[in-house]
Amino acid sequence: MDISNLFALSSAEIKIKHPITGDVLMDEGKGKNKLPMTITVMGTHTREYKKLAREAGFAAIKRNKKHDIEKMSVEEFEAITKENEEAALDLHAKAVLGCNIVMDGEKLSGSAADIKFMFTDERTSWIYEQFKAALEDEKLFFKG
């Protein structure tokens, strides 16, 4: 076997599935023009993603170093935790390269702002859970 057949791709499509049935969701195209709803994401193994992750990590270190956990109140801890979760959300939104998702009758642009909105909207936050699980699956980035 030639190892070059096992190179990981730099990006992959995550197919969005119905949260109850597990069926792949389709867009609103007509007949054969219907396409699966997808999010195209850069791989966590890529230089671009690692750069984004380092930037998020650096910001978290700067943000968290001024806090003494021994003197911290529960409210302060919750605020820091929320900031760190927000940073992870920003990282994931920036890692999205595009999407084919229809929400509120409109196709999302795939911008970080649109993706972040979809991930945090109470109606569609389940998509973020699917996204995170898929991103951790290394097989996603290999040809199959």
Image (spheres, helix red, strand yellow):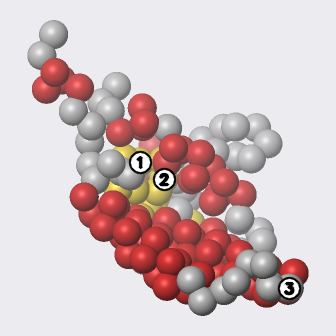
Q: Amino acid at mark 3?
A: Ser
The 10 Å Cα crowd at callout 2, few under 14, some 14 to 19, many 20 or more, is many
The mark lying in front, picked from 3 and 2, is 3
> Which residue does the numbered mark 1 point to in the structure image?
13
Please state which amino acid type lies under the numbered disc 2: Thr
User: Which label is found at residue 73?
Assistant: 3
Kindly report the distance in space between the C-alpha atoms of the residues bearing marks 1 and 2.
6 Å
Query: In the displayed image of the protein, which residue is found farthest to the front?
Result: 70
Q: Position of residue 1 (x, y in %)?
A: 15, 10
* Disc 1 and disc 2 in contact, CB within 8 angstroms: yes
Quarter the C terminus occupies: top left
Q: Could you say which quadrant of the image residue 24 lies in?
A: top right
Q: Estimate the x, y position of residue 62 in percent, counting from the top left.
A: 49, 85
- Foreground: 93 or 104? 93
User: Is residue 106 something that shows in the picture?
Assistant: no
| Dot 3 or dot 2, earlier in sequence | 2
Residue 90 visible in rendering: yes
In the picture of the structure, the residue carrying the numbered disc 2 is 38
Q: Of discs 3 and 1, which sits in the foreground?
A: 3
